[in-house]
Structures are given as structure tokens and as C-alpha cells.
Amino acid sequence: MKFRAAPLVHRAVYEGIVVGMQQAKAAGEGVTAEQVIEITAAAVMTRLQDILIFDQEEENLLTLQRIAEDIAAKPPAQPAQ
């Protein structure tokens, strides 16, 4: 992951914490602090995995674009005579 993804990572952690806390609150009164941490950590990890998948897909698209540009830059092959 490149530096450009840092704002996305911060956003994912924030959203994961918010979602995790909402899920823990919805679970009710009997939830322990350890369970809140586990729920929140799972939500953060889910958000981070989404970013990693997005970043990998973007990197794959850039690689395909570079390959296409390389092919376009090569002169056409001469037919065999």
C-alpha cells in the first residue's frame, strides 16, 4: 500500500471504530469490555481489508494500462516474406 492510501486507512479505522461501537451497543448490557474490543477490532479489520482489495485492484488496473501502453508503443510486426 502506498502513502497515498494513508487517508483511506485513517478513514477505515475511524469507520471501523464507529461501526464496532454501534454493534457493541446493539449487543446489549451484558457485553464485556473485551467483547467490545473484539467487535470493534473485527469491524476495523473488515474496513482495512476492503481498502487493501481496492488498492490491489487499482494496482492491477495500472499494470494493465502500462502493458497496453507498451504494446501500443511498439511498431507493428512486419509480415514474414
Image: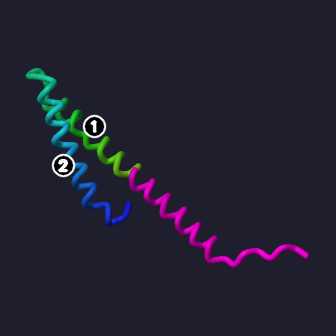
Residue 43 is situated, as x and y percent measured from the top left of the image, at: 25, 39
The quarter of the rendered structure image containing the N terminus is bottom left
Asked if residue 71 lies in the magenta stretch, the reply is: yes
Element class at badge 2:
helix
Of residue 57 and residue 81, the one placed in the foreground of this image is 81
Q: Quick one: which residue is furthest to the right in this view?
A: 81
Which residue is pictured at 31% across the width and 48% down the height?
Answer: 48
- The answer to which quarter of the image holds residue 15 is top left
Asked if residue 57 lies in the magenta stretch, the reply is: yes
- Residue 42 vs residue 71: left or right? left
Of residue 4 and residue 76, the one placed in the foreground of this image is 76
Q: Give the residue type that dot 1 points to.
A: Ala
- Residue 27 vs residue 7: left or right? left
Which residue is pictured at 25% across the width and 60% down the height?
Answer: 7
- Residue 66 vs residue 20: left or right? right
- Residue 44 vs residue 74: left or right? left
Q: Where does label 1 land, which residue?
A: 42
Magenta residues span 54-81
